[in-house]
Amino acid sequence: MTAAIILALVTLQRLAELVLARRNTRALLGEGAYEVAPGHYPLIVAVHALWLAALWWLAPGRPVSWLLIGLFVLLQLGRLWVLGTLGRRWTTRIIILPGAPLVRRGPYRFFSHPNYAVVAAEIAVLPLAFGLWEVALLFTIANAAVLAIRIRAENKALSPK
């Protein structure tokens, strides 16, 4: 029951973020922004959806490490920091708004892709909280492969021309 509640909260959070991302994407496109490298986006969606599906399939009924759930909650604070810093510019796609300066405040003062660092940690930590190291390993590798494509495309799109 405990795992199901945790997974329900994570699933609801992800669905709410998709609504926010879609709204922000539409608004940015309406202001003249454009999407870059959309071809990898279905891979990102697949990795995240399969990760959640694997957790829903395997985690219910398993013991929960509250220490790792605490770490996951801290990661959510990092996620909120990223979302709050980017504001209406946060999306799940690579959306470029011509003339807009790069964000260099909040967690972006410290490194260029804090959202991806949070996501990578989440993908490892949540399965580990249920003792599912195999799921953590498999999806960490899959996420790293997709992020390698995405970060390369995003860095190219954001680099000065």
Image: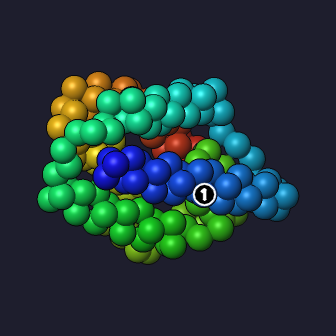
User: Can you give x and y, in whole percent of width and height, for residue 63 in the image?
Assistant: 18, 44
Residue 139, placed above or below residue 27: above
Residue type at tag 1: Ala
What is the residue that sits farthest to the right in this orientation? 30
Under tag 1, what secondary structure?
helix
Is residue 66 visible in the rendered image? The answer is: yes
**Can you tell which quarter of the image residue 20 is in?**
bottom right
Residue 103, placed above or below residue 94: below
Is residue 96 visible in the rendered image? The answer is: no
Which residue in the protein does label 1 denote? Answer: 16
At horizontal 71% and vertical 52% (from top left) the residue drawn is: 22
Q: Is residue 13 left or right of residue 19?
A: left
User: Callout 1: 10 Å neighbours few (<14), some, many (20+)?
Assistant: few
Could you say which is closer to the camera, residue 81 or residue 9? 9
User: Can you give x and y, in whole percent of width and height, for residue 159 in the image?
Assistant: 53, 49
At horizontal 84% and vertical 58% (from top left) the residue drawn is: 30
Could you say which is closer to the camera, residue 93 or residue 119? 119
User: Can you give x and y, in whole percent of width and height, for residue 125 in the image?
Assistant: 24, 46
Q: Is residue 155 left or right of residue 137?
A: right
Could you say which is closer to the camera, residue 111 or residue 114? 114
The total of numbered circles placed on residues is: 1
At horizontal 28% and vertical 66% (from top left) the residue drawn is: 74
**What's the image's color scheme?**
rainbow
Residue 36, placed above or below residue 68: above
At horizontal 65% and vertical 67% (from top left) the residue drawn is: 88
User: Can you give x and y, in whole percent of width and height, for residue 148 in the image?
Assistant: 40, 32
